[in-house]
Amino acid sequence: MARAVRVWALSCALLFGAVSNAAAERTAESEVAGVIKAYDEAWGRKDAAAFEQMLAADYVYFTSKGALWPRQRWLGLMLSPKYALASAERSEIVVHRTADTAVVGSRWKGHGTYDGKPFRDDQRCSLVLARSPTGWKVLSEHCTQIVAG
């Protein structure tokens, strides 16, 4: 009988531990998705202070044409008065993460103007984030334009 109770107690501990781990995973994924949402909102507002907090010091952007832009160049574009984002939406968000790293895949659609010329983007994007003592930081981003077939 005592053995059966110990087996039952161990089974419950394992089950509740698995449920607890699954809940923690969902919470962490939700936290990462929240960072992406805040990133997109900062982009829409051209919020330099928010970018300072969210982008890692060594952030890099891989353009859809193969260029590599350091953090300052990316911020220069995002904050430029020549760049006006009229609307943007991110969908199809998938978060893959380990304890301190997350890779986020998504689809980003937006339109606006740059230097007075209209643009319309429909892109597949991946963002790499790392957990820091002050929260999740965006390390890199790569977006590829989806070309209509």
Image (cartoon, rainbow, N blue to C red):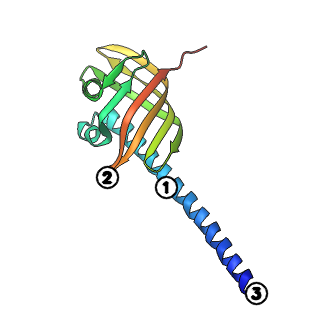
Of 42 and 106, nearer the camera is: 106
Q: Earlier in the sequence, mark 2 or mark 3?
A: 3
Q: Residue at x 28, y 14 (%)?
A: 115
Tell me the quadrant of the picture where the N terminus can be found: bottom right
The residue carrying pointer 1 sits among few (fewer than 14), some (14 to 19) or many (20 or more) residues within 10 Å by Cα, namely: few
Of 72 and 117, nearer the camera is: 72
Q: Secondary structure at mark 1?
A: helix
In this rendering, the answer to whether 13 lies above or below 54 is below
Q: Position of residue 82 (x, y in %)?
A: 26, 19
Tell me the quadrant of the picture where the C terminus can be found: top right
Q: Which amino acid does the dot numbered 1 rest on?
A: Thr
Circle 1 sits on which residue? Answer: 27
On residue 133, the disc is: 2
Q: Is residue 6 left or right of residue 67?
A: right
Q: CA distance from mark 1 to mark 3?
A: 39 Å
Q: CA distance from mark 1 to mark 2?
A: 18 Å
Q: Residue at x 31, y 52 (%)?
A: 133
Q: Quadrant of residue 39?
A: top left
